Amino acid sequence: MTGSDSSQPHDGPEFDLDRRVFDMVSSTASRVDPDAPTRFVYHESEGVLWGEYVGDTVVVGRFCGVRRDATIDISFVHLGHGDAGTTTGTATSEISRAEDGALVLTEEFRAPDGSLHTSVCREVVGAAPA
């Protein structure tokens, strides 16, 4: 994916997410367990994103999408713990940088009931992808 068309994914180094690890720190959709939050592992190539996540409310999850500069658009599916079943959806995140340099993802997504939610994930600096 090349060219200067703004509709193309962006491969700029400022927010390259390849092999970065994030922990969820807050969500309006569910309680976040501070001792075992949902952990996301991102992969990126030329603005195309994919990855996986597991944690307090999720047995296993997968996502794919694109990054355009500081905006991420993804589709996801995950299996929840207990009788939660699978959940699918789309989400949009904005990337920012914390004072200590860690990346922060602020995500908006719609729950299966149609309600809009916000979650925040923070980069775990130095964490190696599994």
Image (spheres, rainbow, N blue to C red):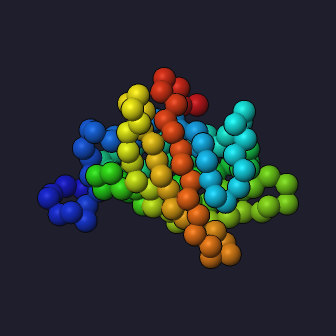
Q: Residue at x 67, y 40 (%)?
A: 37
Q: Is residue 48 left or right of residue 74?
A: left
> Whole-percent x and y of residue 126?
48, 23
Q: What residue occupies the far front of the structure in this picture?
A: 99
Q: Does residue 125 appear in this view?
A: yes
Q: Residue at x 56, y 59 (%)?
A: 118
Q: Residue at x 69, y 46 (%)?
A: 32
> Whole-percent x and y of residue 77?
62, 60
> Whole-percent x and y of residue 96?
38, 45
Q: Where on the picture, by quarter, is residue 111? A: bottom right
Q: Residue at x 34, y 40 (%)?
A: 16
In which quadrant of the rendered image does the C terminus lie?
top right
Q: Does residue 53 appear in this view?
A: no
In which quadrant of the rendered image does the N terminus lie?
bottom left
Q: What residue occupies the far right of the structure in this picture?
A: 83
Above or below, 11 against 88 in this view is above
> Whole-percent x and y of residue 63?
53, 54
